[in-house]
Image (tube, rainbow, N blue to C red):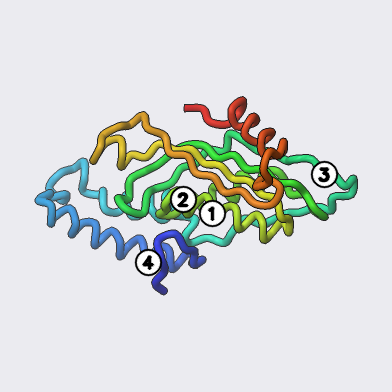
Amino acid sequence: MVKKANENVPRTEGEINNMMEEAAKHYGKFLNALGFDYLADRQTVDTPKRVAKSWMKDLVVGSVTEGPGMTIFPNEERYEGVVIQTGIRVNSICAHHNLPFTGWASVAYIPGDYVIGLSKLNRTVEWFARRPQMQESLTQQIHNYLKDNLKCESIAVSLSSKHTCCGIRGIKMPESVMTTNSFSGRFMEKDNLVREEFLFAISKNGNKF
């Protein structure tokens, strides 16, 4: 089944193993096409297999696995404040150059009838990040997924990342940081202290470059 770079199609272990085997063959051809005889070098003889495994088991594992179980609990005390999780590590690869971008995510929501198990915010970020991505799309995917599963209107997601494609190629500015935000509900209201509280939490506990 063909999909877009940042979409998800869960695969069986057998399917994943077959995909890794096929990918290794093609990566070997890729190296040969660039003039590298990987079979003649003891350091690279298994490189195609290693690359295929690293993609399927780590770099794009979010493309082939089921989403994180969204454990939600009744908001019995009717908590109406902001729930903020900062310092969530982001490890992804850009869809354009297949080079890494890394950084930090901060996520917040205002509960309605439900609250979520805190680790699920981290797991949601990780699941969407582990696939070829544009940071803009990643930010929006996380926002939409949480909004749908938490059944609440007020969600805030902020990502700040350094992109290798800007650091080691092209403009070659490794210290530049890209920030993307997606807000909804009360986080969009003008002069709202809820939004200020979220941004203050990021400034104190969020990005750690």
* Type of amino acid at the residue the image marks with label 2: Glu
Q: In this view, does 110 lie to the left or right of 22?
A: right
Provide the residue designation for mark 3: 80
The secondary element bearing badge 3 is classed as loop
Say whether disc 3 or disc 1 marks the residue closer to the N-terminus: 3
The residue sitting at the bottom extreme is 1
Provide the residue designation for mark 1: 140
* Type of amino acid at the residue the image marks with label 3: Glu
Provide the residue designation for mark 4: 18
Q: What is the quadrant of the N terminus in the image?
A: bottom left
Q: Nearer the viewer, residue 135 or 63?
A: 135
- Bin the neighbour count of mark 2 within 10 Å (Cα to Cα): few under 14, some 14-19, many 20 and up: some
Tell me the distance, in whole angstroms, between the alpha carbons under discs 2 and 4: 32 Å
The residue sitting at the left extreme is 35
- Quadrant housing residue 150: bottom right
Tell me the distance, in whole angstroms, between the alpha carbons under discs 3 and 1: 24 Å
The secondary element bearing badge 1 is classed as helix
Viewer-nearest of discs 4 and 3: 3
Q: Which mark is residue 44?
A: none
Viewer-nearest of discs 4 and 1: 1
Say whether disc 4 or disc 1 marks the residue closer to the N-terminus: 4
- Bin the neighbour count of mark 1 within 10 Å (Cα to Cα): few under 14, some 14-19, many 20 and up: some
* Type of amino acid at the residue the image marks with label 1: Gln
- Bin the neighbour count of mark 3 within 10 Å (Cα to Cα): few under 14, some 14-19, many 20 and up: few
Asked whether the beta carbons under mark 4 and mark 3 sit within 8 Å of each other, the answer is: no
Provide the residue designation for mark 2: 136
Asked whether the beta carbons under mark 2 and mark 1 sit within 8 Å of each other, the answer is: yes
Say whether disc 2 or disc 3 marks the residue closer to the N-terminus: 3
The secondary element bearing badge 2 is classed as helix
Q: How many marks?
A: 4
